Structures are given as structure tokens and as C-alpha cells.
Amino acid sequence: MPYCNECGKKNDDDAQYCTKCGNYLAKSSSFEKDIDKFAEEFGRKAERFGKRIEKKAKAFAKSVEESSRSTEKHCSDCGTELDSDAKFCRKCGKKIE
């Protein structure tokens, strides 16, 4: 679909004149080809960027998960996982120090 060089309106493929401003539409201008080429290139770069962000987000999520595991408290007698503010084990009743 040709775009008008004057006003930018997108026109039908068979249009010879812009329906908005009446400007003559040059067929398959190099400007339109450049736009298509740059749009495709931008799309490829955006996809690669998205994949890198996704990889970094997964690595970050994994590190957060691992760090949360390392801060978990457990009863020294029975091994039950404890709430961070627990003063006694909910399974064996041992006092947590």
C-alpha cells in the first residue's frame, strides 16, 4: 500500500492520487522500501532483545528462589521448616534459639 509523501496517508494499491490531499502517488518509492527494510530489521532486533531479557529474567528469578531457600529456618531436632518469627517448633515443640 502506498503512503502519500505529502501527508503520510496510507492509500489503496491501485490509487494514483492520495485520497486525503490529492497528491500524486509515485509507485513503489525507495522511501517505502527503506521503511519496510528498517521495519524488518527493527523486528529482528526487538526479538533478539526480548530473548536476552527473558534469559536474564529467568536467571534473576532462579537467584531469588535460591536466596529465599537459604534464609529458611529449620528445627535442629526434627528438621521441620519454621516461620521466620517462630519461637518454638510446630512439630516437636523444641524452643528455637
Image (cartoon, helix red, strand yellow):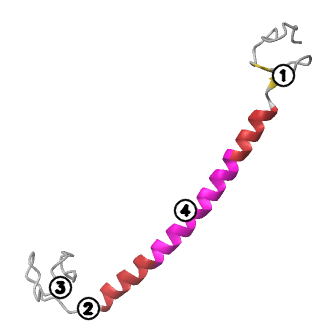
Task: Identify which amino acid the numbered label 3 is placed on.
Answer: Asp
Q: Quadrant of residue 19?
A: bottom left
Q: CA distance from mark 2 to mark 4?
A: 32 Å
Return the residue at label 1: 74
Query: Looking at the image, is 54 positioned above or below residue 39?
Result: above
**Residue 32: x %, y % from top left:** 30, 85
The mark closer to the camera, 4 or 1, is 1
Q: Identify residue for label 2.
A: 28
Crowding at mark 4 (Cα within 10 Å: few <14, some 14-19, many 20+)? few
Q: Residues within 10 Å of mark 1 (few under 14, many from 20)?
A: some
Nearest-to-viewer mark from 2 and 4: 4
Mark 3 or mark 1, which is nearer to you?
1
Residue drawn at 43 percent across, 78 percent down: 40
89 relative to 29, above or below: above
Q: Is residue 47 left or right of residue 1?
A: right
Task: Give the quarter of the image for residue 6.
Answer: bottom left
Q: Are marks 2 and 4 in contact (CB under 8 Å)?
A: no
Residue 45 within the segment the image draws in magenta: yes
Q: Earlier in the sequence, mark 1 or mark 2?
A: 2
Quadrant in which residue 80 is drawn: top right
Q: Which one is closest to the eye, mark 2 or mark 3?
A: 3
As helix, strand or loop, the secondary structure at mark 1 comes to: strand
- Label 2 element class: loop
Looking at the image, residue 54 sits to the left or right of residue 46; the answer is right
Find disc 4 in the rendering and name its residue: 50
Q: Quadrant of the N terminus?
A: bottom left
Per the image, the residue denoted by label 3 is 13
Q: CA distance from mark 3 to mark 1?
A: 71 Å
Amino acid at the residue labelled 4: Gly
Name the front one of labels 1 and 2. Answer: 1
Rendering coords of residue 79 (x, y %): 86, 22
Q: Which residues are magenta?
A: 41-61
